Image (spheres, grey):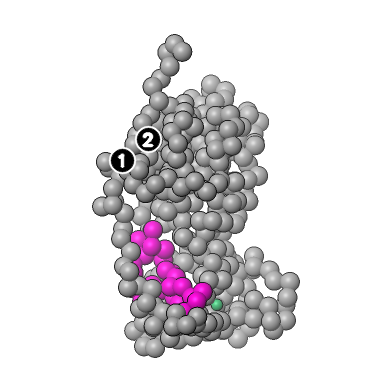
Amino acid sequence: MANRVEMKSAAQVLEAFDNIRRAQRAGVYAPHKPLLILLALARVQRGEPRLVAFNALDASLQSLLAEFGPSGAARSRHYPFWHLATDGRGALWNLNGPRDLLARPASATPNLGELRAHQVQGGFAPQVDEALREVPGLLEAVAARVLETCFPTTLHADIAAAVGLSLDRPAAAGEFDAPTYGAADRRRRDPGFRERVLRAYEYRCCVCGFDLRVGQASAGLEAAHIQWHHVGGPDIEPNGLALCALHHKLLDLGAFTVEQTEHRVLFSQHAISGDRGQQGELRHHGQRLLAPQHPGLRPGSGFLAWNQENVFKTPARHVGDVSRPGRLVRG
Ligand SMILES: [Zn+2]
């Protein structure tokens, strides 16, 4: 083939994706770009063409951001489709559409209607696309890395399933580590965090009291980070909650949060349960968390505020016996 641009190496591809993550503001949950990337990776995995019209991804982006993003995230679902093209000066993502539209400054993001009306297409840059298709395991390594660095572990399987990505064939660990991409860049997890948090709450879910043991070990009980570890949340008890697997996932999906003053569980108005009786999930709404053993281990206000701003799907349901619910979580 004449004029063929040389395919990027696996290390170069991984580095290009990693640079996007570095550009994200520390401490803020920003799921837009990673969800678009995962959706696009799934297309490549299925052998679909390199470029895809925004129209074809619109509904998927909307539902992904509604499920996995904070409140209102879906309104700006078209931003990454446009802005990814300026990352690394187009090294990763290319656009195809009317010349005058593409000539706009990067900051002049077209609105949804313009992207739809002009049939703007986007896709990975040819050298990246080719490497993802040709190098065995590279696509899975990129996807695993994006999941690991952008989302809490509780949601990885759900997100992969929602974008249609198969991770059945994970790359061997370290196989594609680029030089700039090593362990030093990754925040280590404190292996004692789980045990300290579970002990603080006496090995019970602090929402529902679940405390099953199998033999000596707690089963289905997890130490949740209130401010997620991958966005800088520390491995300390005031940033931890002992939660059953269900309540851990519901916290990370923004279905409920915990207000700062009385530590009441507040469910989102978006969380609907068919069973409205005493046995339904919403029976926990308005309840106080089970307190940890020592006041010094209670959840930190700053971490709870982070959850409310970045993860919780506002507005909160009303709590009759809390005096000023409107002040607890913005509606
Ligand atoms: Zn629970």
Residues drawn in magenta: 218-243
Q: Is residue 165 left or right of residue 28?
A: right
Q: Quadrant of the C terminus?
A: bottom right
Residue contact at pointers 1 and 2, CB within 8 angstroms = yes
Inspect the image, locate mark 1, and give the three-letter code of the amino acid beneath it: Ala
Q: x, y percentage for residue 45?
A: 55, 38
Above or below, comparing residue 126 to residue 31 in the picture: above
Is 77 contained in the magenta span? Answer: no
Specify the quarter for ligand 1.
bottom right
According to the picture, the residue beneath numbered tag 1 turns out to be 178
> Is residue 157 among what the camera can see?
yes
Q: Residues within 10 Å of mark 1 (few under 14, many from 20)?
A: some
Residue at image location 53% in from the left, 21% down from the top: 99
Q: In which image quadrant can residue 106 be found?
A: top left
Q: Is mark 1 within 8 Å of ligand 1?
A: no
Q: x, y percentage for residue 107?
A: 45, 37
Q: Residues within 10 Å of mark 2 (few under 14, many from 20)?
A: many
Tag 1's secondary structure?
Answer: loop
Residue at image location 46% in from the left, 30% down from the top: 134
Residue at image location 37% in from the left, 51% down from the top: 25
According to the picture, the residue beneath numbered tag 2 turns out to be 10
